[in-house]
Amino acid sequence: MSYDEHSAEAFGSPSHLNDLSDGKKVEREFSHPVYKKISAANGRINRMTLKNLEDALSYLNLSTRGSKEILQKRLKAYVRKDNLKRDSVDDTAAPHYVDYYIVIDFEATCEEQNPPGYEHEIIEFPAVLINADTYEVVAEFASYCRPVVHPTLSEFCKKLTGITQVQVDSAPLFETVLRRFEEWLNQQIKPKETFCISTDGPWDIDRFLKQQCKRLNIQIPHYFHRWVNVRKHFYNYYKIKQVNVELMLQHLGMEFEGRPHCGIDDSRNIARILIQLKKDGADMCINETFR
């Protein structure tokens, strides 16, 4: 492939998978007085009412959408950044950033009750390309895939995903779609630009893609070996548990756009969540790898 292989390594070594693992950063937080000011400000923010938070964010020209937990975190991130800037404190962590995020949410064959040993096959391969600096969606890729092990979709699968039998019957095989996806990557991303895959949870890569490639005896592309788990970042950053895509959007004051369990619509909505996390100050580093 023409793009540089270091794209997959753009977030550094596996030690970066653990948030706040940089001991020097922790030491610095205890050594500079600015961090005491930030801590005191966080305490005041914790005591603010929802109306107080909305007023403060509005005054700062920041978004007032979202639940109280979201607004608290948004205001804390602003106050932290502002205080560090005022005191000329360099709080830059190890380089974690990439030029692009590629959000993927596969749809796969399924039954209402999957029997033991059931082999899921990917039947929709969507991707949404986000510019990490501008927060803009700059391109999309979408294709259905023709299943082989379960060529006839169950009624449950068709109802859940909205994918029809005609659509998969006329679709190319997965290996062809994967090759076309890589061709699309080459068209979108320059050789020296970096990117990483992003998903809602570990299942798309660690279960669906891994199983698909193993069955076909094809090598999993290197850039799928480690990825950004958006749901895990959402929990770790906002401290909100037990969420799915629709609940994450609700907490952020947004509504799901499109059809749930449509792969490209799911990918677009996960992209919206990722973008808002970045705007709110989350470090969207790679936090998932093959188990």
Image: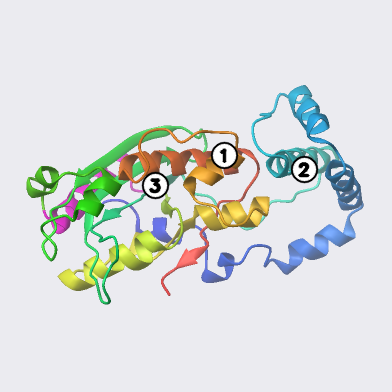
Of marks 2 and 3, the one in the foreground: 2
Does the stretch in magenta take in 73? no
What's the mark number on residue 76?
A: 2
Task: Tell me residue 256's x, y (percent).
Answer: 46, 36
Q: Hey, which quadrant is residue 78 in on the image? A: top right
| Residue at left offset 39%, top offset 47% | 102
Of marks 2 and 1, the one in the foreground: 1
Q: Is residue 117 above or below residue 58?
A: below
Q: Is residue 211 left or right of residue 59?
A: left
Does the stretch in magenta take in 184? yes
Of marks 3 and 1, the one in the foreground: 1
The structure's colour scheme is rainbow
What's the mark number on residue 102?
A: 3
Q: Hey, which quadrant is residue 110 in on the image? A: bottom left
Q: Does dot 2 land on a helix, a strand or a loop?
A: helix
Main SS, magenta region, reads: helix
* Mark 2 / mark 3, whichever is N-terminal: 2
Q: Residues within 10 Å of mark 3 (few under 14, many from 20)?
A: many
Q: Is residue 208 left or right of residue 284?
A: left
| Residue at left offset 55%, top offset 45% | 248
Q: Is residue 274 visible?
A: no
The alpha-carbon separation of the residues under discs 2 and 3 comes to: 28 Å
- Identify the image quadrant of the C terminus: bottom left
- Identify the image quadrant of the N terminus: bottom left
| Residue at left offset 54%, top offset 33% | 254
Type of the residue with mark 3: Ile
Type of the residue with mark 2: Lys
Q: What residue span does the magenta drawing correspond to? A: 173-193
Q: Nearer the viewer, residue 159 or 276?
A: 159
Q: Nearer the viewer, residue 148 or 77?
A: 148
Task: Tell me residue 158's x, y (percent).
Answer: 22, 48
Q: Which residue lies under the disc numbered 1?
A: 250
